[in-house]
Image (cartoon, grey):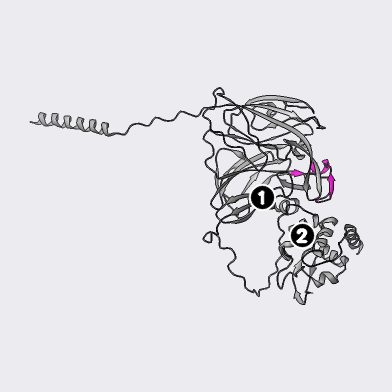
Amino acid sequence: MTKKFLLLSAMLAACTRADEGSARPNVQVSEPAPDTTGSPQQVVTAELTNAPEVPHRMVRKHPARVIVNLEIREVEKQIAPGVTYTLWTFGGEVPGKMIRVRQGDVVELHLGNNPSSKMPHNIDLHAVNGPGGGAEGTFTAPGKQTQITFRATNPGLYVYHCATAPVPMHVANGMYGLILVEPPEGYGYADREFYVMQGELYTSGKYHDQGHQAFDMDKGIDEKPTYVVFNGAEGSLVGDKAIHANVGEKIRIFVGNGGPNLTSSFHVIGEIFDKVYAEGGSKPQENVQTTVIPAGGAAIVEFTVNVPGKYSIVDHSLFRAFNKGAVAQIVVDGPPMKETYSGKQAEVAYTGAVETAPVAVAAPTGGDVGAATYARICAACHQPTGMGLPGTYPPLASSDYLAASPPEKLIGHVLHGLQGPVTVNGNTFNGVMPPMSFLSDAEIAGALTFARSSWGNKLAPVKPDQVQRVRTQSASTP
């Protein structure tokens, strides 16, 4: 009896195991590893773009032979309102053309140096595993073309730049760009992608000195740039040149720092980066406010814009932003999102003893020096319309104070600041105007001329030599 029971139990257990096995789901077969080492399956010509545009992603399962045709050109460009400079470029613009390839691609790069160039140049691509990053094989005289081939083995975002002696001079004159080696799986969906690159300009003249400027080697050696800019010039990404997006869109920015000297503190005012691929690497950090990008380095930043409005992109080493030009803008269109950000809800009188310092604003797109200086320095307090702030900052529009004050008095206010009550159009104002002696003679004259000829004012212009005389007299007065 016992033996029969044991035999029956064993048979039932076997049947149960068989049933369980038949009910087990099919084992999924894993996808093969992406091909990043195989021979190229096709030949394609790379799409190259000028900043802030980004080449389209290539959806391929296998490596290709990618032909990159890059031309060096030395061109004269405007780098600030009324200021020109001879830039050395990869493709006619600063930064150079953006290159986008897939990990495993074999890149055949043809580097041509336009016959109009004065200098030989080459290219060092940080994505290249080989001596000089390709520089040794691409030394190219004017009117010549060289070629190298390399396998894009490591995914990431990489800087390329000229490495012809003196290397810092070539880089400072604009010879830098980005090459993206995208992993086969990509970086995921983004509604918009942009290409932004920071760089420095070392001019013989001061900030906003007018006319054509030469390169100043001593400033470069001392690491004291006259300008720190995005995409090659002050105002290159503001106003009508700003980049655009819509509420709810995911933005990805490929950011580089050409240097040649300064580390960038990259920040978007009013946004938090959802992801940052620091130094262009493979592992993202999340919820980042400001990311550090070394000279010759890069980063990929991603964020979603949820509130409409105008956002400033800056180097958060802020004197570079407000006094050297490192400002760009993103304009976001769409319906208000009050649950995320309300905007101003109230404004009432406050009786506490609080001193409020005026805040400088971002550089404008261009135009004459006076309008640009007013928008960058003066508009935060006196307002873009010249109407001022009641009780604090007097209006400049139809101002009897402007009309009654000689230019030398107004120049003194700008150079040395102004404290204490003043009466304008019958109203008393008791704010604080800080000294602005760091502005050039041309900027001060231009800003005053702009104010004296705008918003109903019809007063004579102020000349730079008038500012110079007041500045000199002030310096000689004990």
On screen, residue 152 versus residue 357, left or right, reads left
Estimate the x, y position of residue 215 in percent, counting from the top left. Answer: 82, 41
Residue at the bottom extreme, as displayed: 426
> Which span of residues is magenta-colored?
200-222
Relative to 24, is 474 above or below?
below
Estimate the x, y position of residue 74 in percent, counting from the top left. Answer: 78, 36
State the residue position of label 2.
374
Disc count in the image?
Answer: 2
Q: Do the residues labelled 2 and 1 touch (CB within 8 Å)?
A: no
State the residue position of label 1.
242
Q: Earlier in the sequence, mark 2 or mark 1?
A: 1
Q: Tell whether position 207 is magenta.
A: yes
Relative to 24, is 288 above or below?
below
Q: Nearer the viewer, residue 132 or 140?
A: 140
Identified by mark 2, the residue type is Tyr
Relative to 8, is 215 above or below?
below
Estimate the x, y position of residue 444 in percent, counting from the top left. Answer: 83, 59
